[in-house]
Amino acid sequence: MNRKDLTRIGMAAVLAAMMLTGCKSKAAEETTSAAEQTISEAELTDEASIEIGAYKGLKLTAEKADVTDTDVQTELENLLSAYPAEVSGRAAKLGDVANIDYVGTKDGTAFAGGTASGYDLALGSGTFIDGFEDGIVGMRTGEEKDLNLKFPDGYKNSDLAGQNVVFHVTLNTIKNAEESEIDDSLAKRVLADDNATLDQLKGQVEEYLHLNAENDFFNMAGSELLEQVIANSKVVCDPDAVDQMYDQMITTYTAYAGQYGVDLDTFLSIMMSTDKDGLKESAENLVMQEMVLDEILANEKIEATEEQKNALAKMNGFDSAEIMTAAYGEESANRLFEMGAVYYYLIDNAVRAD
């Protein structure tokens, strides 16, 4: 993972760096006492410092993607797959999504993890043990059925491995995307509104795609320019701040790895194409980003406008800056607004590359 990859992490990662690290800017260091300034050269290497380089007139290559009718149609087709219509008058078949209730028992007693209600199961996906999905094929809506099955010998739960069990299944509904249409009924399902229309859904899809395009451009452009500022500057991070960021990243990614049922090294290699050394580099780069952004913020006395705050809130999935502030807390939200304002400043003062 190289520096170019790291700086494309985006505003969310930059915010994480701000909340978790304590690197000081050059301006902050100038407030240290005379006694502190007499420390040895060796000790000085453990203090953060920055000599900011050029950050105006930088070359910008990132461009905002256009949203086409084809993009809207593709997103509608994706929604059709995610929200298939119910079908009736026939039995369930492979390719359907069966909404089911089920209770699994061993020797007449329900076992942990073997019960669910309103579960959407794609028939043919291989999600459940052998025989479960095939047993639902041929059932009709409202039908109940006992499936006599056996867990595989190598099943991860040793209490169930190789055991005979019975699943009592109730088929609630059958859904199939191929038998659905992109019409008003799709809009009603997606928007959970019986009065919704396809035109309303198209409008929301188009707005969503434009927001994504704006978000992607903002992050790509800001990251591209921030990378140039870092290259133009002399930045020394406090090792303690880097270690703190690294430890937090280790904790976070270890939790993610656990959710996937793999160890940390495997997760980093497969999911992030990196290792712990690359993660250490990521931590240092995030701390550098914070320092550079803070320095520009102080030098230019930048303040986020209300328009910028609301735009940043929408990029983060909120309808307004006010709602985002309520969710994140004032300190965290304002920190992101400040750093977002610096991104806007870099972009506004950049020069489009030929």
Image (cartoon, grey):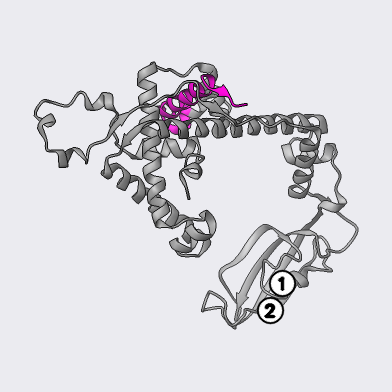
Residue 70, percent from left and from top:
80, 37
Residue located beneath label 1 in the image: 132
- Residue drawn at x 67%, y 76% as measured from the top left: 166
Outermost residue to the front:
354
Main SS type for the magenta part? helix
The amino acid type found where label 1 is placed reads Phe
* Residue contact between numbered discs 1 and 2, judged by CB atoms under 8 Å: yes
- Residue 278 location, x and y as percent? 42, 53
Q: Residue at x 76, y 66 (%)?
A: 124
Reply above or below: 1 against 319: below
Secondary structure under badge 2? strand
Say few, some or many: other residues with alpha carbon within 10 Å of mark 1 (under 14 / 14 to 19 / 20 or more): some
In the rendered image, the residue lying farthest to the right is 89
Q: Is residue 238 visible?
A: yes
Question: Label 1 to label 2, Cα distance in Å?
Answer: 7 Å
> Vertical placement of 281 versus 354: above or below?
below
Choose between 175 and 34: the one closer to the eye.
Answer: 34
Is 340 displayed left or right of 135 in the figure?
left
Q: Quadrant of residue 338?
A: top left
Q: Which mark is residue 149?
A: 2
> What x and y, as percent, mark residue 221?
55, 31
Q: Quadrant of residue 14?
A: top left
The image quarter in which residue 26 lies: top left
Q: Amino acid at mark 2?
A: Leu
> Within the magenta stretch, is there residue 328?
yes
Task: Write down the region rendered in magenta.
Answer: 325-354
Q: Secondary structure at mark 1?
A: helix
Residue 29: give x, y in percent of width and height.
23, 27
Closest to the observer, 58 or 131: 58
Residue beneath the point at 71% across and 72% down: 132
